[in-house]
Amino acid sequence: MKVLRPCCAAIDVGSIMMMVAYSDRNGNQHLMEVDAFTEDLRGLADKLKAAGVVQVAMESTGMYWVVVYEILEEQGFKVTLVNARHFKNVDGQKTDVKDCQWLHQLHAHGLLRASHIAKENFRELRSYLHERNTLQVQKSDTLNRIHKILTQMNVKVQH
C-alpha cells in the first residue's frame, strides 16, 4: 500500500509512560519511550516538530489522552484520536511497542478513523458543566445525610 502520510507519528498512551513511533523527513522510523509528565510531553512535541512530523495518531485511553491531545494541538499538530477497538484486531502478544508501531503503520497508510473531538472552547464549557453537575449532586447528598443524622438524633428540622 502507498504511504499517504510519510512524516507522521503514533502514540500508545499510558498513565505513566507512552510509546511513540514516528517517521522523520528522511523516511527513517524511530521508536521512543516518553514519560507522561507535562514537561516530557512538551519535549516530545518539540522533538516531533524538529523531525518534521505534522500529524499524530493516538489511542483514546481513559482520560490519559486529554493532556497529550491538548499539548500537541497547542503546538500545531493535526491530532487524530482513535478508538482502540477500531485498530486492535491483530492476534498475538500485545505490547505497548507493537501497539504503537501498528498504530503508526495504519496512520501512515491513512487507515484510521478519527473520533470526533469538539473544539477547545466547547470542551472547556463541557468540563465546567460536568463539574457544576457533580457539585450539585454532592450538595444534595450532603444535605440528605445531614437530614438523616438530625432525624436519628430526634431533631425534627422538617417540622
Image: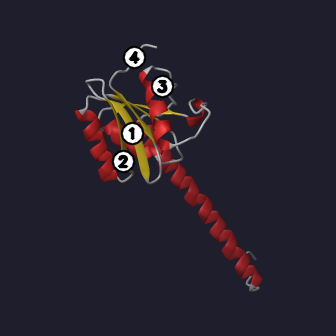
What's the amino acid at mark 3? Answer: Leu
* Disc 2 packing (10 Å; few <14; some 14–19; many ≥20): some
Task: Name the residue at 62% across, 59% down.
Answer: 137
The residue indicated by pointer 3 is 106
Q: Is residue 158 in view from this perspective?
A: yes
Task: Name the residue at 46% across, 37% down.
Answer: 100
The residue indicated by pointer 2 is 34
Q: Secondary structure at mark 1?
A: strand
Write down the quadrant of residue 159 in the picture: bottom right
Looking at the image, the residue that sits furthest to the bottom is 153
The residue indicated by pointer 4 is 4
The reply to whether dot 4 and dot 1 touch (C-beta < 8 Å) is no
Question: Does 50 appear above or below 139?
Answer: above
Q: Is residue 157 in view from this perspective?
A: no
Q: Secondary structure at mark 3?
A: helix
The reply to whether dot 2 and dot 1 touch (C-beta < 8 Å) is yes
What's the amino acid at mark 1? Answer: Val
Q: Nearer the viewer, residue 144 or 39?
A: 39
What's the amino acid at mark 2? Answer: Val
The residue indicated by pointer 1 is 20
Say whether disc 2 or disc 3 marks the residue closer to the N-terminus.
Answer: 2
Q: CA distance from mark 2 to mark 3?
A: 21 Å
Say whether disc 4 or disc 2 marks the residue closer to the N-terminus.
Answer: 4
Residue 51 position, x and y percent, is 25, 32
